Image (cartoon, grey):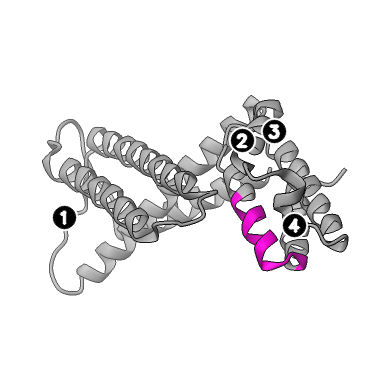
Amino acid sequence: MMEAKQLIEMNNRRRTELTPENEKYYSDFLIYIRLQFFLSEQQSEEILMEILDHIIEGQKEGKTALEIFGNDPKAFADELIAQIPKENKRNLARFISSLSLNMLGYLLMIRGAIIYIISFFKDVDITVYPAKSVLLFFIILGVSLFSAWAIFKIIGGSLFLEKKNSAADTVKAAVVGMTAFGVIFSSSHFLPNVGPNFDFSWYFSLVIGFLVWGASRFLKNW
């Protein structure tokens, strides 16, 4: 049995065989199902490959995806989603852990790089307050996840429409992004420095950030 990654690669190759009309139909269908993160990735990709195979076979007979699956692809997709089992809890926990470590690694590396660059021009306070840092990290993580969910909802709402309002969707996504930035910036600015503290140099920030990022990649591919 092919793994999900292999199915995704094959899907990307075979989609080039679709006509523009069928590719548009199938792309909306594919994005809609892949946005359901809590479903089994393996079985979702298997179903997507089956759908793609049917469309390609239908093309050879002169049929369109609309003729094969009907003019309500969202309803059809919802029927399939209802039959796909949820992702294994272990895989889901590994995904969330990998995502969290990945974000933490990037934040530490970005912090190290910024401190290093600014230190050429002025003295930089490298004091870290663990209580504030941990709380700020979870705020950033929560806001990022919520923002991603909101943007995916915007994307999902624009699928299967004959006339898509890309400008309106862009504005909505921009509002989500600016709101997220505002919450994170306000939190980092107004959260008080309390509890014990220590100096955390740019060098150690970069090194530890890289190690944490590496751990996230290992966990993702494990």
Residue in the image at 70% along x and 39% along y: 44
In this view of the protein, which residue sits in the foreground, 214 or 93? 93
The residue to which callout 3 is attached is 80
Seen at 13% across and 64% down, the residue is 123
Q: Is residue 96 left or right of residue 206?
A: right
**C-alpha distance separating marks 2 and 4:** 18 Å
Residue at the image point whose x is 64% and y is 45% from the top: 71
Residue at numbered disc 2: 75
- Mark 2 falls on what kind of element? helix
Q: Which residue is mark 4?
A: 64
User: What is the magenta segment's predominant secondary structure?
Assistant: helix
x and y percentages locating residue 200 in the rendered image = 28, 50
Q: Residues within 10 Å of mark 1 (few under 14, many from 20)?
A: few
Residue interval drawn in magenta: 17-28
Report, in whole angstroms, how far the alpha carbon at label 1 lies from the one at label 4: 63 Å
Q: Is residue 125 left or right of residue 146?
A: left
Q: Residues within 10 Å of mark 3 (few under 14, many from 20)?
A: few
What type is the residue that disc 4 sits on? Thr
* Label 2 or label 4, whichever comes before in sequence order: 4
The amino acid type found where label 3 is placed reads: Leu
Quarter residue 14 falls in: bottom right
Which mark, by number, is residue 125?
Answer: 1
